[in-house]
């Protein structure tokens, strides 16, 4: 009874987590899409560059959330004869695409903010403040939806970072609206637009770097290959380890291949079991190990 109950409990827990995350994406997309419409309309009506730039960024976030949800669902797809790992790698490509979308949004915001500084137009501070206040609530709530799962997946972490940054940006836009209302300093509005761009760049830089590294099959963040080789070589029965390659199958799963030198090939099953347990603890879920004896003399033993 115990052996039957544990897998069922784990499966139920995993399914519940996936359902919860899917619901978070749907809520986030719906709320932000609605807010983009409101913010864009108010920005156009009152001629606020701060609101229009924030609406443009929020629109890119809606696209990012849609892509992240697509990646989330593709990662659950089964393997096929043509795609033997399924569509897990799509999560990395979508994460990289999301970063590119955000960087394009930054360019547009900077260009329009500079244009508004050169050719200023009157704006209504009160409308800006009220609209941005709604944005603080929408973005803050959306960020909260992803906070508990942000360390599980790069796309979820990206969604969380974007929403958290947007909440801070909306606070800035709100403050600019208050300042304009009290002082009439309309130049504050395009300055906030530039500040929006700065916040986006800071929030997306690490995501872009990590996504690019994983798309090039670089070593995933948090894994030190030298340390991993040392740990593997310390396992009982292992004489040496070489030809170690580590890469990401997806934004949540890592793979490894390695050559393992053992004194006696008859002990390889126990050694393999111990190595795979160690690798799983180090964040590597898929490992392919090739065993050899010192007498075989692998031509690339020096690596």
Image (cartoon, rainbow, N blue to C red):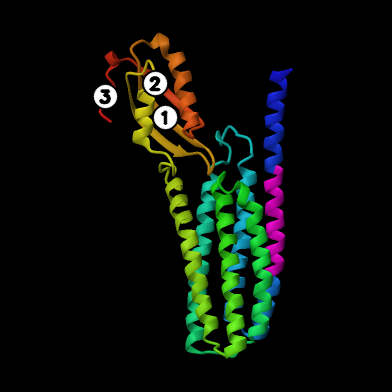
- C-alpha distance separating marks 2 and 3: 23 Å
- Give how far across and how far down residue 30 sits, in percent: 72, 60
Q: Which mark is residue 174?
A: none
Q: Which residue is mark 3?
A: 299
The reply, left or right, for residue 161 in relation to residue 136 is: left
- Mark 1 or mark 3, earlier in chain: 1
Q: Which residue is mark 1?
A: 257
- Mark 1 or mark 2, earlier in chain: 2
- Give how far across and how far down residue 133 sits, in percent: 66, 73
Which circle, 1 or 2, is nearer the viewer?
Answer: 2
Q: Please tell me whether residue 106 is drawn above or below residue 214 in the rendered image.
A: below
Which quadrant of the structure image shows residue 161? bottom right
Element under disc 3: loop
Q: Check if residue 25 falls in the magenta segment.
A: yes
Which circle, 2 or 3, is nearer the viewer?
Answer: 2
Element under disc 2: loop
- Give how far across and how far down residue 29 sits, in percent: 68, 59
The magenta-colored residue range is: 19-36
Determine if residue 200 is in view: yes
Q: Which mark is residue 235?
A: 2
Determine if residue 53 is in view: no
């Amino acid at each position: 009874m115990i052996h039957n109950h544990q897998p069922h409990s784990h499966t139920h827990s995993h399914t519940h987590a996936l359902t919860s995350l899917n619901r978070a994406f749907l809520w986030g997309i719906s709320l932000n899409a609605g807010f983009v419409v409101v913010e864009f309309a108010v920005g156009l009506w009152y001629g606020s560059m701060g609101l229009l730039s924030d609406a443009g960024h929020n629109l890119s976030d809606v696209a990012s959330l849609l892509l992240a949800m697509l990646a989330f669902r593709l990662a659950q797809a089964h393997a096929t004869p043509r795609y033997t790992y399924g569509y897990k790698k799509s999560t990395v490509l979508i994460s990289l695409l999301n970063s590119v979308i955000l960087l394009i949004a930054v360019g547009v915001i900077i260009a329009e903010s500079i244009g508004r500084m050169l050719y200023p137009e009157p704006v209504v501070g009160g409308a800006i403040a009220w609209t941005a206040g709604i944005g603080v609530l929408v973005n803050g709530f959306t960020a909260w939806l992803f906070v508990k799962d942000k360390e599980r997946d790069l796309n979820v972490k990206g969604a969380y970072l974007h929403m958290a940054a947007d909440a801070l940006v909306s606070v800035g836009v709100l403050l600019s609206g208050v300042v304009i209302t009290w002082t009439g300093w309309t130049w504050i509005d395009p300055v906030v637009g530039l500040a929006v761009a700065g916040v986006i760049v800071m929030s997306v830089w690490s995501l872009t770097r990590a996504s690019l590294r994983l798309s090039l099959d670089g070593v995933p963040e948090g894994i030190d290959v030298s340390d991993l080789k040392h740990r593997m070589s310390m396992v009982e029965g292992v004489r040496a380890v070489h030809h170690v390659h580590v890469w990401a199958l997806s934004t949540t799963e890592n793979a490894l291949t390695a050559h393992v030198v053992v004194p006696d090939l008859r002990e390889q099953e126990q050694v393999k079991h111990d190595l795979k347990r160690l690798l799983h603890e180090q964040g590597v879920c898929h490992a392919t190990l090739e065993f050899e004896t010192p007498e075989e003399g692998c031509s690339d033993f020096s690596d």
